[in-house]
Amino acid sequence: MTQRRSAGEGSIFRRADGRWCAHVALHSGQRRYVYGRTRQDVAVKLRAAVKSREEGLPLPPTRETVESFLTSWLEQQRSRVRPRTWMRYEQFVRIHVLPVLGKVLLNHLGPQHIERLYADRRAAGVGAVSVHHLHTVLHKAFEQATRWNLIQRNVVRLVDTPRMPRREMSVLAPPEVRTLLASAAGGPLEALLALAATTGMRRGELLATRWRDVELERGVLRVTGSLQRDTSGVLRITEPKTARSRRQVELSSLAVEALLRHRTQQTEHRLRLGEEWQDHDLVFPNPRGLPQDGSHMVAGQFLPLLTRAGLPRIRFHDLRHTAATLMLGRGVHPKIVSEVLGHSTIGITLDLYSHVTPTMQRAAAQAMDEVLGPQRPE
């Protein structure tokens, strides 16, 4: 809660953790933060900092710890990132960082502390992928600390990024996709899987799709949001993952026909349910019309369907990889595939699906032979 400041005190406020905080603007345009248990403590430190600034002297050292800084940083991030992202940040800080580095003074933090943190986490059995993501979170957090002038340099920059093993994606072959769709025909997942396998839409995007986003006559669908849990555990439709994720997708005839059947079945179900149906205009709601929990759908319906169809156990997200691989393998331009998937750059598409590149290169070589090779007599 922001408090009214006394004359000459500058900006003093109380943080969510109960401590008092203030900042003083430096001549460079940056801010220097001071902290204390009471408002009076902070007022004294702030006056000393202002006096040092005006006299051109070094500012008094701060007693900010890694824990107190990361607590403030997380509060700032709460309104800046998606709820699911914030929860991952909070988990990384609470579970991995604070038990090891929480009590270290921020201005005493060095690259050796970060190196020891990574080694400690690996020794505790934390996977390489998680340590890599931890590195990304810390880099972002301490970059903010440098901008706030709490530290002179981002020590995470001085530590090598932990190597992250490349996970081989599981991709269904065309006959397997046909088997999957045939097994789902007439069931609750028919249209959902048809869209996933032909457009590569993310699970959250599919579950956030509303009927007003779909124009079956034109065969197009607009991706306008993603279904995610917020920090309180409530399912909500949020903004898409990136600006490029908000897009229009052309639908195949297979997907349009599946959606038409799905709409008819949903209408019949809604009429049977009567007042118990809660209309949120969702294309793929739960049986009562409310947002559907994606994890429950995967565990309760998708994975059992794979087993019944005799298909390998894959992640739902692998249907996205399958769609991209099929499109690229059939010669669809990577730029178009990137737009369909909602990637922020074409480079992401080419990097993720480099396993298709040899096939594309062979097709390119054959095309050059056809254009420039010896002319065959007619």
Image: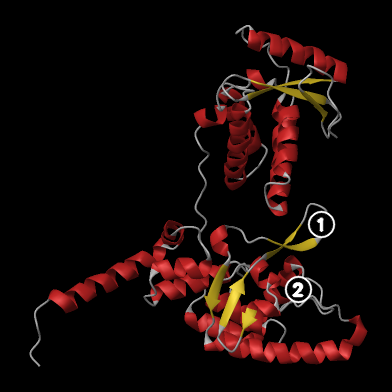
Report, in whole angstroms, how far the alpha carbon at label 2 lies from the one at label 1.
20 Å
Residue 30 is marked as none
* Secondary structure at numbered mark 1: loop
Residue that mark 2 sits on: 300
Q: Quadrant of residue 34?
A: top right
Q: Is residue 330 above or below residue 320?
A: below
Q: Identify which residue is drawn at 85% across, 27% down.
A: 4
Of marks 2 and 1, which one's residue comes earlier in the chain?
1
Q: Is residue 235 above or below residue 144?
A: below
Extreme residue toward the right, this view: 275
Q: Residues within 10 Å of mark 2 (few under 14, many from 20)?
A: few
Query: What amino acid is labelled 1 in the image?
Result: Gly
Could you tell me if residue 95 is visible in this image?
no
Q: Quadrant of residue 112?
A: top right
**Location of the N terminus (image quadrant):** top right
Nearest the viewer among 327 and 344 is: 344
Q: Quadrant of residue 280?
A: bottom right
Could you tell me if residue 73 is visible in this image?
yes
Residue that mark 1 sits on: 233
Q: Residues within 10 Å of mark 1 (few under 14, many from 20)?
A: few
Residue 279: give x, y in percent of width and height. Answer: 82, 78
Q: Identify which residue is drawn at 59% across, 25% down.
A: 29
Horizontal side of 231 relative to 190 (left or right) equals right
Q: Nearer the viewer, mark 2 or mark 1?
A: 1
Q: Is residue 154 above or below residue 337?
A: above
Residue 141: give x, y in percent of width and height. Answer: 63, 35
Residue 213: give x, y in percent of width and height. Answer: 65, 76
